Amino acid sequence: MAAAAFLMSFVVVAILLSVVLAWRRWRRRRRRGGSSNNNNTSYNDGLLLPPSPRGLPVVGHLHLLGSLPHRGLRSIAASHGPVVLLRLGSPTVVVVVSSALGDEEVMRARDLAFASRPASAMADRLMYGRDVAFAPYGEYWRQARRVCVAHLLSARRVLSFRRVREEEADKLVSRIRRLLSCSKNEKPIDLVELLVGYANNVVSRAAFGDESSRGLYEDDDGDRGRRVRELLNEFQKLLATQPVGEILPWLGCWVDAVTGLDRRVRRTFRALDAMLDKVIDDHRRQSRRDFVEDDRREDFVDVLLDVSRNEKEYGVRLGTNEIKAIILDMFAAGTDTVTTAMEWAMAELVTHPRAMRRIQHEIRQAAVGEKHIDDKLPYLNAVIKETLRLHPPIPLLVPRQTLEDTELLGYRVPAGTRVVVNAWAIGRDTATWGRDADEFVPERFLDAEVEVDYRGQSFELIPFGAGRRGCPGVGFAEQTVHTGLATLLYHFDWEPAAASASLDMTEMNGLNVHIKAGLHLRAKPWIPPS
């Protein structure tokens, strides 16, 4: 402990000294007539860079982001406009977009110019540098994404996993009933933990198939499944972590080692690699068996192995590392995103009892027995849209990078610039949503003259992005959330752990923004009238 405290103190002192030295160099440049924060830089075509607030030496504008960057960036946009230029650390220049008009230009009008991704050290180290979500624009990305859209996440494939979703939703209900039985309804339920298990099991069965998922998760004491869930949770945490080396390269080479980040990444990568090797080897052996099961569904690994074996037919070469990377994409995009959306939807409904009563009445009226709930539930769909508007699972969409010099709302954006779209700020823009933009009002989607869509056609609501870089897994996530929420709201009545107290809705920052205090609720089983 003493050694660790000494090292951390040394890091802090080194950073402070570096800032002081950089500040002195900056002052000397200012005296010579230079400026490190010139907002009026122009080019031959007369366009200016976007406006930028005053920054600090070395760290730039990092100090303005605060503990919740999506909120800090919204405040900056309120003062400087919907497009701002920020310097986050030494090398990183970022243009932040905070309006529907701006993201429409990024994702539709000039989609190709904004179609690449900046380098991500974490994605490269954990996902073999061959995934789809973080890949730079190019031939591999185009072909791999086509495989995902047409073969992994097509409407037909998503529909084929309906039984998986329904079975996992039924298991979720059974777990809640067991918890209620053990505690005699006295203890509140940690719903987030249960939602994580539901989302993770759906993605695992879709990705690996039932047999491999059982092998990974099921044993007598449950330790194996717990270890796999902890591994996938650590993977997602690391993916959301920005190494110091990406912000301050001259510090990162040793700070990330001292803090243990490098060691965590290596350990997690080795464990993920071993797990995926086993699953892929099992599937290869199974594909060589001389039998056919008529009711067997192809999982994601089956599909990707078929692509790998038929390179000419599919037009893309997928090796083992590419298959592993794409599978990890499915977990990164399909687990935490689904959990976050369901978590915030339940929190908002518990906080708004009138909306809770209306949605439960709709679901219970539409149910046929206890096993089937009609897909056509307009108020449930409105609740999901309103939740995604107020609480997009990834408030700051995965950054883009410009392929060429381009324009954005009349400003010049040079080639190679990182571009971040603040989906959270756009969803709460009063110019679009009115004075009650920060309020939970699902009815706004029922009364709208023009249907608002979150699949990339309505740029005022873009939780999954749009254009070339839009998330191809929207349909999969949508159905998983729909089934899980409908099942929870059909079988149980919900209220806060302390009926007299309101929920603490404070956010916890990360790649996906969760409720900091968790979601502890009381559940009462609902018995249909005879």
Image (cartoon, grey):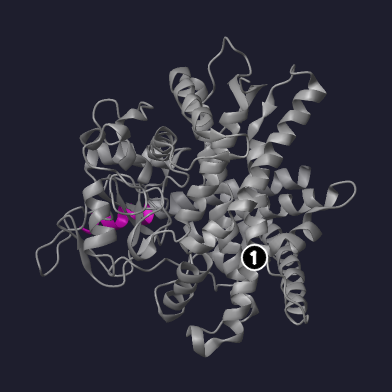
Furthest-front residue in this view: 530
Closest to the observer: 11 or 136?
136
Furthest-right residue in this view: 220
Task: Give the image quarter of residue 94.
Answer: bottom left
Q: Can residue 510 be seen by looking at this rendering?
A: no
- Main secondary structure along the magenta-highlighted residues: helix
Residue 344 position within the rendered picture, expressed as x and y whole percent measured from the top left? 50, 34
Does dot 1 land on a helix, a strand or a loop? loop
Residue 143 position within the rendered picture, expressed as x and y whole percent measured from the top left? 45, 78
Q: Can residue 22 be seen by looking at this rendering?
A: yes
Closest to the observer: 192 or 38?
192
On whether residue 30 falls in the magenta region, the answer is yes
| 256 over 7 or under it: above or below | below
On whether residue 404 falls in the magenta region, the answer is no
Residue 97 position within the rendered picture, expressed as x and y whole percent measured from the top left? 29, 50
Determine crowd level at label 1: few under 14, some 14-19, many 20+ residues with C-alpha closer than 10 A. some
Residue drawn at 21 percent across, 62 percent down: 109
Q: Is residue 327 left or right of residue 5?
A: left
Q: Is residue 357 left or right of residue 265?
A: left
Residue drawn at 78 percent across, 59 percent down: 216
* Image quadrant containing the C terminus: top right
Q: Is residue 39 left or right of residue 478?
A: left
Task: Give the image quarter of residue 419.
Answer: bottom left
Residue 393 position within the rendered picture, expressed as x and y whole percent measured from the top left? 48, 44
Residue type, numbered disc 1: Arg
Furthest-bottom residue in this view: 312
Q: Is residue 63 left or right of residue 27?
A: right
Give the labeled residue for mark 1: 297
Closest to the observer: 225 or 61?
225
Magenta extent: 24-34
* Image quadrant containing the N terminus: top right
| 28 over 346 or under it: above or below | below
